[in-house]
C-alpha cells in the first residue's frame, strides 16, 4: 500500500521517514516532491565499462540554468536528504518534468529500507532543455513492507551507496563480481 499524506506525516513524526529540508507545501496526496540539487556530473569517457571505475566530473548548475543535451547521461542529485527506516521509497519523475522530455532515472527508482542519503538521478532528455538548481524534479512515494527486515540497507557491509553526499555518485557496478 502507498502511504497517504497523513500517514507520511505520522511516519515523519515517529522518525521512520526523514526528509531534510522538509517543506509542508511539497507534500502531495500520496507523495513528497523533491528538488534538483545544485550539482550535476558527467562521465569523463564516452564509452563506459561495467567492470571499470568510470570517473565523473562534477559541476555546479549556474544561476541562469544549464541546458541538457540529448545523447548525454547526466548524474544529478536531490536537494533533499532522506532516510527511510520502515518503508520502501520509490522515486518517480513529476509529470511536469516528463512533459519537458526529462527522464530522472534509467532504472534505479526504488530505494531500500534503511537507505539514508540524497538520491542520485540518472538524467536524460528527449531534446535540449534548460534546467535549474532547486526546480521540482521528482516525487517520493512510500510503500509499506510486509514482514520483518533482516538487514537494513544502511547496515549492509557491502552497500555501495551509503556515504552521505550532496553530489551525484557514479556507478559502483565495478565493485560487483561477475
Image (tube, rainbow, N blue to C red):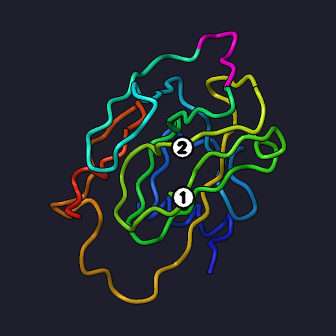
Name the spot of residue 92 as percent of width and height, x first. Answer: 64, 56
Check disc 1 and report its element: helix, strand or loop.
loop
Q: Disc 1 vs disc 2: Cβ atoms closer than 8 Å? A: yes
- Residue 149 image-quadrant placement: bottom left
Which residue corresponds to mark 2? Answer: 122
Which disc number belongs to residue 107? 1
Q: Which residue is drawn at 50% across and 59% down?
A: 12
Check disc 2 and report its element: helix, strand or loop.
strand
Q: Mark 1 Cα within 10 Å, few/some/many (few <14, many 20+)?
A: few
**Tally of numbered tags:** 2
- Residue 62 image-quadrant placement: top right
Nearer to us in this view, 86 or 13: 86
Q: Which residue is drawn at 72% across and 44% down?
A: 25
Name the spot of residue 151 as percent of width and height, x first. Answer: 24, 74
Nearer to us in this view, 16 or 60: 60
Q: Is residue 45 left or right of residue 77?
A: left
Nearer to us in this view, 52 or 33: 52
Q: Which residue is drawn at 46% across and 81% down?
A: 145
User: Which residue lies most toward the front here?
Assistant: 47
Q: Is residue 18 above or below residue 85?
A: above
Q: Which quarter shows the C terminus?
A: bottom left
Residue 67 falls inside the magenta stretch: yes
Earlier residue among tags 1 and 2: 1
Nearer to us in this view, 163 or 24: 163
- Residue 136 image-quadrant placement: top right
Bounds of the magenta segment: 62-68
Name the spot of residue 77 as percent of width and height, x first. Answer: 50, 36
Which disc number belongs to residue 157? none
Amino acid at each position: 500500500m502507498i502511504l497517504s499524506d497523513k500517514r507520511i506525516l505520522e511516519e515523519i513524526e515517529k522518525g521512520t521517514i526523514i526528509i531534510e529540508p522538509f517543506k509542508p507545501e511539497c507534500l502531495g496526496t500520496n507523495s513528497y516532491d523533491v528538488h534538483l540539487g545544485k550539482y550535476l556530473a558527467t562521465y569523463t569517457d564516452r564509452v563506459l565499462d561495467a567492470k571499470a571505475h568510470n570517473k565523473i566530473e562534477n559541476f555546479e548548475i549556474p544561476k541562469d540554468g544549464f541546458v541538457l543535451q540529448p545523447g548525454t547521461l547526466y548524474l544529478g542529485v536531490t536537494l533533499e536528504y532522506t532516510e527511510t527506516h520502515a518503508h520502501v521509497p520509490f522515486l518517480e519523475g513529476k509529470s511536469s518534468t516528463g512533459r519537458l522530455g526529462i527522464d530522472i532515472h534509467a532504472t534505479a527508482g526504488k530505494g531500500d529500507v534503511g537507505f539514508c542519503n540524497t538520491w542520485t538521478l540518472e538524467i536524460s532528455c528527449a531534446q535540449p532543455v534548460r534546467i535549474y538548481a532547486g526546480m521540482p524534479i521528482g516525487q517520493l512515494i512510500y510503500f509499506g513492507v510486509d514482514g520483518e527486515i533482516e538487514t537494513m540497507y544502511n547496515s549492509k557491509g557491502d552497500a555501495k551507496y551509503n556515504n552521505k553526499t550532496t553530489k551525484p555518485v557514479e556507478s559502483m557496478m565495478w565493485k560487483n563480481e561477475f
